[in-house]
Image: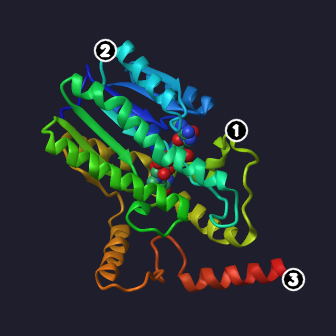
Amino acid sequence: MELGAGKVAVVTGGGSGIGLALAKAFAGKGLSIVIADVQDDALERAQAEISALGVDVLAIHTDVSKHQEVDQLAAVTVERFGGVHVVCNNAGVAGIADPWTGPLASWEWTMGVNFWGVVHGVRAFLPHLVMGGGGHIVNTASIAGLWPGMAAPYDASKHAVVALTEGLFNSMQSAQLPIGVSCLCPGWVRTGIMDSDRNWPAELGDKPEIDPVANITRKHVQRAIDEGTQPAFVADLVIDAVSSGRYWVFPHPEFVELAIERFHRIAEGLNPEIPEEMPGMPPRSQLLAESMAALAAFTD
Ligand SMILES: NC(=O)c1ccc[n+]([C@@H]2O[C@H](COP(=O)([O-])OP(=O)(O)OC[C@H]3O[C@@H](n4cnc5c(N)ncnc54)[C@H](O)[C@@H]3O)[C@@H](O)[C@H]2O)c1
C-alpha cells in the first residue's frame, strides 16, 4: 500500500525499542501515529519524540493482553482520526523464570502479551481496516517463531504468532480482501527486551527471579542484544514490506539458516539438536562449560 499523509498507523509497544522505531518510520512517511503501551513514562517520551517529527500523535495507555483495552484503543483511534490504515501488533516481553520449575504466571504473562496481544490487535482493528477500504497488519514475531532456541514460553508464543499471522494472510487472500499482512522475524535487536520485567504486572504476583545458572546464558544474550541491530534498520525493512506488500520481514538472514537446518532435520525425522554455533553467542560447548561451573559453585 502507498504510505503518506492522511493515513494512520497504530503501533503497540510503541513506547520504546522496535515499536518506537516503527512509529518514527511511519511518521517519517507523513502518517498520523497512535502509540499504545503499558509503560507511561516511555509513552510520554515517545509521544514528544514523534510529535517533533511534525505529525499528529496520540499516546494511549493500553495493556494488549486485555481485549477490552485493545478494543478501546481501536475505538479511540477511529474516533480521533476517522479511520486506520496500518496496525503493528508489536508489544512483546521476554520472561526470566524457569519454564518448568518457575511460576506459571510467567507463562501467562508471556502468552498474554506476545500471543493474546496480537490476537486482540487483529480482531479489534480488522473490521476498521476492511470498512475503511483496506490496510496492512504487521505482526512482530521473532526468529524464535521459526526456530525454538531462546526460552520455551517465548518460543511458544512466537511460534503461535507466526502461525496465526500466516492464517490471517491466507484468510485475507481467500476472501480477496485488500488487507496486506507482514510477519516480522528479527534476530538480535538493540532494545530493552531483556529488561521486560520492568513491566511485570502486579496482578500476577511476585516478580519471578532468575537462577544463577540461567543467568550465564542471559549475560551472553544481553551482550548480543546490546551489540544487535539498530531498531531503525528493522523499521525501514517494515516500511519497505508494507509498501511492497511483502509478507516475511527477515532482518537477520543468518538466523533463518538455523530454521532451515531445523526443518531439514524435521524432514528426516531426526531428533532436535542444539547447534554448536548461534549468531552473536559463544559456542555451545563454552556455554555448557560456564553453566556447569556456575552449577558447581551454586551447589557447593
Ligand atoms: N529485541 C530483540 O532482539 C527482538 C528480537 C525478536 C523479536 N523481538 C520482538 O520485538 C517486539 C518489541 O520488543 P523490543 O525488542 O522493542 O523490546 P522493548 O522492551 O524495547 O519494547 C517492548 C515494548 O512493549 C511494551 N509492553 C510490554 N508489555 C506490554 C503490554 N502488556 N501492553 C502493551 N505494551 C507492552 C513495553 O513497555 C515496551 O515499550 C516484541 O514483540 C519482541 O518479542 C525483539
- The residue carrying mark 2 is 82
What kind of residue is marked 1? Glu
> Is 276 on the left-hand or right-hand side of 53?
right
Looking at the image, is 223 positioned above or below residue 283?
above
Residue nearest the viewer, comparing 148 with 24: 148
Q: Quick one: label 1, few (<14), some, or many (20+) residues within 10 Å? A: few
Looking at the image, is 229 positioned above or below residue 177?
below
The picture places residue 61, in percent across and down from the top left corner, at 55, 26
The picture places residue 133, in percent across and down from the top left corner, at 18, 25
- The residue carrying mark 3 is 300
Q: Is residue 25 visible?
A: no
N-terminal-most mark, 2 or 3 = 2
Q: Is residue 278 visible?
A: yes
> Is 64 on the left-hand or right-hand side of 28?
right
What is the quadrant of residue 125 in the picture?
top left
Task: Residue at 38%, 68% (x, y): give it.
Answer: 255
